[in-house]
């Protein structure tokens, strides 16, 4: 297959939808020689913060001179960004080659009378095949949904398991209680393999501790008391993390969302342990220097990302209730006593009413859009909900219309713009912003 044929194949596979469970991915990886078991993997699960944590870890390991593979989804700005090696997306030629191998294996599975693998299983298998050929020093593998029955959980023994903040999301698949969701996330914990967890609500923490005990897995569960700091302004967050094992980390990140306080601390703790395994000849002091320098340099698009300053225009992928609480805290810290102009697009199966109730007290004006996603909530329906919390709400036919209108209002009123919600519309939002800047709007 060439690149276009490979993309067409994946689009066709996408029509089958998603199915949780490991039987299908296990059959597929059997046909591919179970290459995943040869890889030094850090497995990352959680409700919010997986992408940011992966980005911090990748940057810290790069500072140490390690070759890093990274698999994270969904794609936001480029379909090839899901598979990265040393911070560079897989090439079109590599993508076509890897997908050809995976398609051959899928055809064999189907010829044996088994169901065809889903698109996430195909893409996960492609990640394993790709990294097997690259032979990185470490692979950062991000869970798609949940953990226990997620296709990425086909791995046998990771270098470490990492669990970011757990909250209510994907309830139709993972369960109606925080305990159920935590149990699904805890499914990535493997026998005697270390696990590192962000601070959690006690209900979730209990599940993580219990699962780790059952698996005889050493667990490091961070606590809020160990972390101090907050976003002072867009583009700058400073904090101090006091590790029980490694002492004090003074950390700075340009990813200034308040939720990054937990993510940076979790990344520092995890990276310190992993560097001790991967670079044992270097001192702990050197490990900490790499970690602090890497976190300071980390860039992860769409996470309280400042696109421009005249007016200030920020993108954030907050798409569920817990993320909205964190984003609202960031807004309070960075824009004290200042109203904002919002652009919002969400998916219908998310807790959008709760998100609006949390975020809209800070809104001067709201523009709603319909993300390009089959699960999207229509702009008119979202505007109707938003009108319950804000007097000035406008439903837009396109993201470009929303961005143009928001920039016009923000300039005339001297206010910042914040575009948030589904990750699926952030690329279009960025493109519309850049187009507007070229026109000097």
Image (tube, helix red, strand yellow):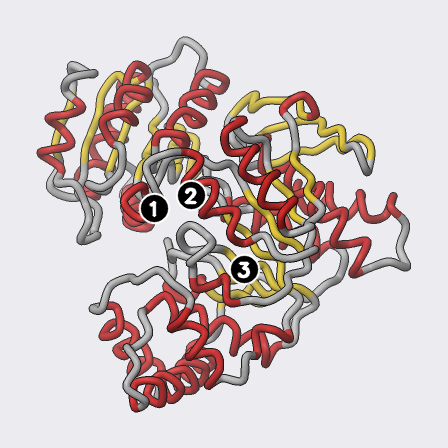
Q: Which residue is mark 3?
A: 141
Coordinates of residue 26 in the picture (x, y in percent): 45, 74
| Quarter of the rendering occupied by the N terminus | bottom left
Left or right relative to 64: residue 420? left
Which quadrant does the C terminus fall into?
A: top left
Residue 258 visible in image: no
Would you say 80 lies left or right of 226 here?
Answer: left
Q: Judge by depth and name the residue closer to the eye, 8 or 190.
A: 190
Tell me which numbered mark, 3 or 1, is placed earlier along the sequence: 3
1 vs 2, front mark: 1
Mark 2 crowd level (few <14, some 14–19, many ≥20, 10 Å Cα): many
**Local crowd at mark 3 within 10 Å, few (<14), some, or many (≥20)?**
many
Q: Residue furthest front?
A: 214
Q: Element type at marker 2? A: loop
Disc 3 vs disc 1: which is toward the camera?
3
Q: Along the horizontal axis of the image, is 21 left or right of 402?
A: right
The disc, 1 or 2, on the residue closer to the chain's N-terminal end is: 2
Label 2 belongs to which residue? 302
Q: Closer to the N terminus: mark 3 or mark 2?
A: 3
* Contact (Cβ within 8 Å) of mark 1 with mark 2: yes
Per the rendering, the mark at residue 423 is 1
Query: Could you tell me if residue 57 is visible in this image?
Result: yes
Tell me: residue 272, above or below residue 252: below
- Report the label total: 3
Residue drawn at the location 68% of the way across and 50% of the way down: 217
* CA distance separating discs 1 and 2: 8 Å
Mark 1 residue crowding within 10 angstroms, few (<14) / some (14–19) / many (20+):
many
Q: Are marks 3 and 1 in contact (CB under 8 Å)?
A: no
């Amino acid at each position: 297959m060439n690149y276009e044929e490979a993309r067409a194949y994946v689009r066709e596979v996408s029509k089958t939808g998603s199915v949780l469970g490991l039987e299908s991915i296990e059959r597929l990886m059997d046909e591919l020689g179970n290459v995943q078991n040869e890889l030094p993997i850090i497995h990352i699960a959680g409700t919010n913060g997986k992408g940011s944590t992966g980005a911090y870890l990748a940057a810290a390991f790069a500072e140490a001179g390690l070759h890093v593979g990274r698999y994270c989804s969904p794609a936001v700005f480029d379909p090839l960004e899901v598979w990265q090696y040393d911070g560079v997306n897989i090439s079109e030629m590599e993508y076509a080659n890897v997908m050809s191998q995976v398609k051959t294996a899928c055809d064999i599975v189907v010829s044996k009378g088994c169901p065809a693998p889903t698109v996430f299983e195909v893409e996960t298998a492609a990640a394993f095949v790709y990294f097997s050929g690259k032979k990185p020093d470490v692979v950062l593998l991000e869970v798609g949904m949940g953990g226990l029955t997620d296709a990425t959980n086909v791995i046998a023994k990771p270098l470490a398991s990492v669990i970011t903040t757990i909250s209510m999301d994907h309830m139709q698949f993972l369960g109606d209680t925080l305990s159920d969701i935590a149990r699904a996330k805890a499914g990535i914990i493997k026998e005697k393999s270390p696990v590192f967890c962000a601070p959690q609500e006690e209900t979730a923490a209990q599940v993580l501790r219990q699962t780790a005990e059952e698996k005889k897995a050493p667990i490091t569960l961070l606590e809020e008391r160990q972390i101090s700091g907050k976003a002072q302004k867009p583009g700058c967050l400073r904090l101090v993390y006091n590790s029980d094992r490694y002492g004090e980390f003074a950390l700075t990140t340009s990813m200034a969302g308040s939720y990054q306080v937990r993510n940076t601390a979790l990344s520092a703790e995890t990276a310190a342990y992993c560097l001790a395994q991967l670079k044992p000849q270097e001192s702990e002091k050197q490990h900490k220097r790499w970690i602090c320098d890497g976190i300071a340099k980390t860039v992860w698009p769409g996470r309280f990302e400042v696109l421009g300053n005249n007016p200030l225009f920020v993108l954030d992928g907050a798409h569920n209730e817990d993320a909205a609480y964190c984003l609202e805290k960031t807004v309070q810290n960075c824009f004290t006593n200042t109203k904002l102009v919002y652009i919002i697009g969400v998916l219908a199966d998310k807790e959008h009413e709760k998100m609006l109730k949390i975020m809209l007290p800070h809104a001067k004006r709201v523009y709603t859009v319909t993300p390009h996603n089959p699960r999207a909530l229509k702009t008119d329906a979202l505007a109707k909900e938003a009108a319950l919390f804000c007097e000035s709400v406008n439903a837009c036919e396109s993201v470009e219309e929303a961005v143009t209108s928001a920039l016009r209002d923000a300039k005339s009123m001297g206010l910042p713009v914040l575009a948030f919600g589904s990750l699926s519309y952030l690329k279009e939002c960025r493109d519309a912003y850049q187009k507007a800047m070229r026109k000097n709007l």
